[in-house]
Amino acid sequence: NKNYQLIKISKYLSYHLRHHPEEIGLELEPGGWVPVEALLAAAQRDQFPITRSELELVVKTSNKQRFSFDSTGTRIRANQGHSIPIDLQLDPICPPDILYHGTGEQAVDSILAQGLQKRTRHHVHLSPDIDTARQVGMRHGKPVVFTIKSAEMHQNGHLFYCSDNGVWLVDEVPPEYLLRR
Ligand code: HQG
């Protein structure tokens, strides 16, 4: 099944471009970029051959636009979700008034007490709409959506970034800026 194959490739890319490039002998360049040639060669060595057209198809059809090519098409990166220390080289921008965060029911008490923390990732990830937040939350159990007072946070000096695929990123969300929906 072709779709299944593309999902497998997407998971392989997420794992290596966000978390463990070194496992296949890759090193991310500033911004999280990897030369496409190097990636395809590394995957080949790793007994996980990917063709260039498969790679292009994954980038184009990924439901969340997880990956991007650079403007010359010679390098690729994950748009967000890294656990390794890379600088995505995004500029802080003004967020919408309200953003959302989806999580699982079991995390609610702790989030209300401590706020949102980035845990293993670089940033806390926020969604621009409730539906997306609910999808993210379902990965963690019974979904719960928090409303985030992002304009107020921004006014108070918190920096917001928006990844190339529309995920909003911030260092933390203190409890006073969140409300359970
Ligand atoms: C929770 C996916 C208890 C937080 C998604 C979340 C997203 C706390 C979990 C992207 C907490 C971390 C990121 C606190 C935060 N107490 N729990 N104080 N603070 N948490 O997976 O936002 O499919 O690292 O609520 O679509 O779920 O990978 O973050 O549940 O865009 O492309 O700690 O990953 O995209 O979980 O998801 P994650 P996330 P991909």
Image (cartoon, grey):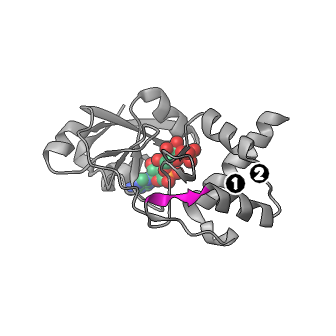
Alpha carbon separation for disc pair 1 and 2 = 10 Å
Label 1 vs label 2, nearer the camera: 2
Q: In the rendering, at what x and y percent does residue 92 appear?
A: 26, 48
Instruction: Tell me where residue 16 sits by quadrant.
Output: bottom right
Crowd rating for badge 2 (residues with CA inside 10 Å; few <14, some 14–19, many 20+): some
Residue lying furthest right: 1
Q: Nearer the viewer, residue 167 or 144?
A: 167
Q: Based on the picture, tell me whether residue 63 belongs to the magenta stretch.
A: no
Secondary structure, mark 2, is loop
- Residue name at image x 80 percent, y 55 percent: 49
What mark, if any, has residue 50 been given in the picture?
2
Whether residue 92 sits left or right of residue 88 in the image: it is: left
Secondary structure, mark 1, is helix
Q: Nearer the viewer, residue 140 or 86?
A: 86
Whether residue 144 sits left or right of residue 116 in the image: it is: right
Q: Tell whether label 2 touches label 1 (CB within 8 Å).
A: yes
Q: Based on the picture, tell me whether residue 33 belongs to the magenta stretch.
A: yes
- Residue name at image x 40 percent, y 56 percent: 88
- Residue name at image x 50 percent, y 52 percent: 81
Q: Quadrant of the N terminus?
A: top right
Question: Where does the magenta region start and end?
Answer: 31-35
Q: Nearer the viewer, residue 62 or 37?
A: 37
Q: In the rendering, at what x and y percent does residue 68 appear?
A: 53, 44
Q: In the rendering, at what x and y percent does residue 42 appear?
A: 72, 64
Whether residue 33 sits left or right of residue 51 in the image: it is: left
Label whose residue precedes the other's in the sequence (1 or 2): 1
Give, as a three-letter code, the residue at label 2.
Ile
Residue 89 visible in the shown view: yes
Q: In the rendering, at what x and y percent does residue 166 appear?
A: 42, 37
What mark, if any, has residue 12 been given in the picture?
1
